[in-house]
Amino acid sequence: MSARNSLDLRRLESLLNRFDRLHLLVAGDVLLDEYLVGDVDRISPEAPVPVVHVQSESLALGGAGNVVRNVRALGAGCTFCSSVGTDSEGDALLGLLEALDVSSEGIERVDGRPTTRKSRIVARSQQIVRVDRETHEPIPAAIARKLIRTTEAAAARVDGAILEDYGKGLFTRATIRKLMQTLAAAKVPVAVDPKGDLSPFKGAALVKPNLREAEELAGIRMRESRDLDRIAARLRSKLGGGAIAITRGGDGMSLYDESAKRIDVPTPKREVFDVQGAGDTTIAALVLALRAGARLREAAVIANAAAGTVIGKVGTATASRDEVLAALPSAIEAAEAER
């Protein structure tokens, strides 16, 4: 293996230590994650369902807000652009952002529109049911214009941008195209975690779907290893180039750089408590590493270390820089074993 392709622990540690010099723009649908955690010791006499005796309740930023949490946990600054309702859930979200020392100036409030809220009931570390309160209707055009203006103002002072489309109405095709044009004009590299049509994101520097999303976006089912190359080629044709990182759960990541060459980066085997939010951790770590000067494979190893940390926690979690530093040796070992 060439020295350029080898993984050096001290270099990766140095890259992580540069994160606090970076500032990212995150734009996308924000969710309020609510957790009701308790225990079960009987079945309801009213219906054949468990009765959960709630012992704790908590709220956390979800969706694009979880990307913001991970960016901050890894030590970088963040500007956030999104929208919430004028309800109590919206108030709670703004309070959570304030606690992260993230400005709410980029958060537009919309009268009559509910803030997306996902309530999870958890017993004995297992999610029993989730209750969603949300709308998928597009935000008003005036709010979309404000979002674009806020992004334009922020573009001059950020090192990179992440667009998170959760399909909750913040992004329309026209809004995405305008955001991409604005960021391209400011020479800000854009990373995308897509849930739908890729074509408005044309020109993105990086796209990070999971395997199921990549199959759906490409219209190709992966039945054997070479199918993944066909999937990546289809995605690349829609994006007009750029790097592709397909996350594959316990199998790690498959990367395609500008040369379209595939690089598989396995991840260490870990006990999994909750995979929720791991994709948000991955894209935050990937983008920060790349903006810190990492090569794509190095960035993937750092992201694997970060994601491996959060799946060992219950609920929507983050990985601190110290936790990622501690996980790096095993992440490097797993990646080098593939070589």
Image (tube, rainbow, N blue to C red):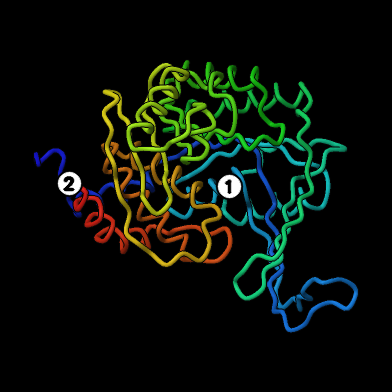
Pointer 1: residues within 10 angstroms few (<14), some, or many (20+)?
some
* Residue type for callout 1: Val
Question: 243 above or below 14?
Answer: above
* Of marks 1 and 2, the one in the foreground: 2
Q: Residue furthest front?
A: 223
* Residue type for callout 2: Arg
Residue behind mark 1: 102
Residue behind mark 2: 339
Number of marks in the rendered image? 2
Q: Quadrant of residue 189?
A: top left
* Residue 246 image point, x, y percent: 41, 38
Under tag 1, what secondary structure?
loop
Question: 304 above or below 27?
Answer: below
Of 157 and 143, the residue lying toward us: 143
The Cα–Cα distance between marks 1 and 2, rounded to whole angstroms, is 41 Å
Residue shown at 34%/39% (left/top)?
254
Under tag 2, what secondary structure?
loop
Residue shown at 44%/58% (left/top)?
319
Question: 99 above or below 111?
Answer: below
